[in-house]
Amino acid sequence: MSVATLFRGKWGQKPKDVTEKQPVVVQQSQEEDDDDDSSTGFSREPIRRNSRFYRSMRKKRLISSEQSENLLPSNGEFSSTHALYNQNAADKRRGGVGGKRTVEISAASCSQQRDFTAEMTFLYQEYRDTSKQQEIEQRRQRDNLFPGVNAGTVVTDSGVMSPPVLQLQLRNSAQSLTLWQNLEAVQASGLLTQLPHKEIIMQEAMFELVTSEASYYKSLEILETHFLRNPVLVNTLSQSDMHFLFSNIEEVMKASERFLMDLEHRIEKSILISDVCDIVYYHAANHFNVFITYVINQAYQEKNYRRILEGNQQFRDTMAALENHPRVRGLSFTSFLILPFQRITRLKLLVQNILKKAEENSDREANAIKAHQELEKIVKECNEGVRKMGRTEELISIEKTLEFKSKSVPIISHSRWLLKKGELQLMGGPKSTRTMRSRKLYQPVYLFLFNNLLLVTKRSGDKFQVIDSCTRAMLRTEDLEDQGQQLANVFNLKLLENQDERQVNYMLKTSSMSDKLRWMCALTPNRRTRFMSTSTHQADSPQVQCIQSYTAQEPDELSTEMADILNLLERTDDGWMMGERLHDGERGWFPSRVAEEIQNKEVRAQNLREAFRIQQAYESGLHSGAKIGVRAGRHAPKDPTHYKWTTC
């Protein structure tokens, strides 16, 4: 029985019952593919250019305009015409055409195919949330199991427990994600009794990368057939609005089709997966640049989507009907638009997971390092592109609101960005005249802190009058002990050399303890105060895992995803934490309600070791790549096997 048959059945149509025991022969037509690569370099054998993924690239066409009036009836529900169109499009993508290539499907495999399809019905949004929730639960259980070794666990050479039963048990439920070890072909092969637990875990990690890619492609199909190719929706938008909303999503989908086809081809070769990171590396180097363009354009997507919703009643009604259709399972249109960025970041984490489990100095480790480096480049370019566009727009917006009384300071610069802004209370008058009963003890000031400049302003309507400025390098802060309610949350800000080349001291009051600490961190990031956690410099630093996603609201905050692990750097009594994410080193503040502390020392140590190994392997790979001259530019060779990759 073919594993490829099982895998294709996972996302395809449920086959009809087969009553005969003889194999069923399905004929498929041979069509020339005019827009794919002639070779991928992953196999000495010719790759099936007629796969369902490549065929889908030829079958995507807008349906005729004559059907438009039948797609959305006046009651807002979809007609049978739309359902028929979607079904026909799905049939074509899933192999419903006749032709040349022969596939043998036994009655037994068809039965298994139906079960497998029913088990794996996740869209990527659902798949991703489920997977992250399982990661959280696995860590919680590991936290509770340490110390001690329970039945079914394995102790690694480092002395850290890695229980395969624990790591996989949450994915074995009927409503959960499919495991490699649960495939009928795998169970029938006897491999599960022959392979060491480490290899089973590795197989599961590689299989998860493949199945998650299939789930991602499934969601992209809905974005395309249900939204992008819907004639009624298209008729509500101008050509420029279509481009703003969907950008180069068709190129992104084409890249996913190529990628998924090669992953599927690898699984067809053997039920024991040899590797997947070599495929990831090739596609990241050759085809994944389309993600960068799409992600950078997402800021325009969001703005124009809101603009169109507010100003286009027909679009708003049509979109409401599309989002209410059962096919999208209650998910919003925007959840489909952000899929590419979510996928490229998640793909990097999946490769990291494989790298953690790969044997040192093995081919798998070398391929995982190369794949991780390529994905890291893409993710960084995506982040930098988004930040650069957002920062430039923000600087332009701020400059329009500023009024300089004397010396004007140019705000817009490619090397400048906003770190923090907000209103604080400035204490006025000399210390000898302070009175705790004065209601005018403090006056509001508004600070704009950039990476290399501080502006002290006063709000005047929609404008801000600049009263002082100073380079960030010349700032110093001093914490003041609380002295009653009037002097609570107060700190001194010293400008060693302001715009008039004088030293000035400001006593500032914030609204909360966390706000004071965040301002002090931002103004003088290298300062030492009583708030700096002493454990920051210890080997066993406190760690938290995120149990909720959080979107940053201010420049000094950190957007977090479920299952992120962070070293805890600082915390406040009023519900804020500052952390450094282990997998990418990003720092920032986030609410303590979205995270829970990892209590067990052994689990924290394991997390640090894994992060260190990834960082070490990444740096070693960079050094080796520079040493042997691998890929000076962004374009990789057609066949990555032409090069030898070594690690130091």
Image (tube, helix red, strand yellow):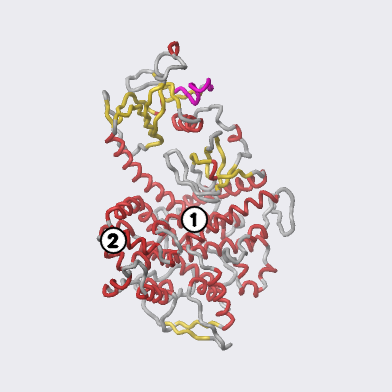
Q: Against 16, is 484 above or below?
A: above
* 284 to the left or right of 460: right
Provide the secondary structure element on which disc 2 rests. helix
User: What amino acid type should be assigned to the residue bearing mark 1?
Assistant: Arg
Q: Against 541, is 445 above or below?
A: above
The number of numbered discs placed on residues in the rendered structure image is: 2
Q: Say which quarter of the image contains residue 353.
A: bottom right
Asked if residue 90 lies in the magenta stretch, the reply is no
Foreground label between 1 and 2: 2
* Residue 240 in picture, x, y percent from top left: 26, 58
Q: Against 612, is 245 above or below?
A: below
Q: Is residue 350 visible?
A: yes
Comparing 57 with 447, the one in front is 447
Residue drawn at the location 38% of the way across and 26% of the way down? 444
**Mark carried by residue 475:** none
The residue to which callout 2 is attached is 314
Provide the secondary structure element on which disc 1 rests. helix
Q: Say which quarter of the image contains residue 455.
A: top left
Q: Return the residue found at the far top.
A: 432
Residue drawn at the location 35% of the way across and 36% of the way down? 416
Of callouts 1 and 2, the N-terminal one: 2
* 580 to the left or right of 81: right
Q: Return the residue found at the far front.
A: 75
Examine the residues drawn in magenta and state their main secondary structure: loop
**Mark carried by residue 346:** 1
- Cα distance, mark 1 to mark 2? 36 Å
User: For mark 1, does the 10 Å Cα neighbourhood hold few (<14), some (14 to 19), or many (20 or more) residues?
Assistant: some
* Residue 50 in picture, x, y percent from top left: 42, 76
User: For mark 2, does the 10 Å Cα neighbourhood hold few (<14), some (14 to 19), or many (20 or more) residues?
Assistant: some
Comparing 51 with 120, the one in front is 120
User: What amino acid type should be assigned to the residue bearing mark 2?
Assistant: Gln
- What's the magenta region? 481-492
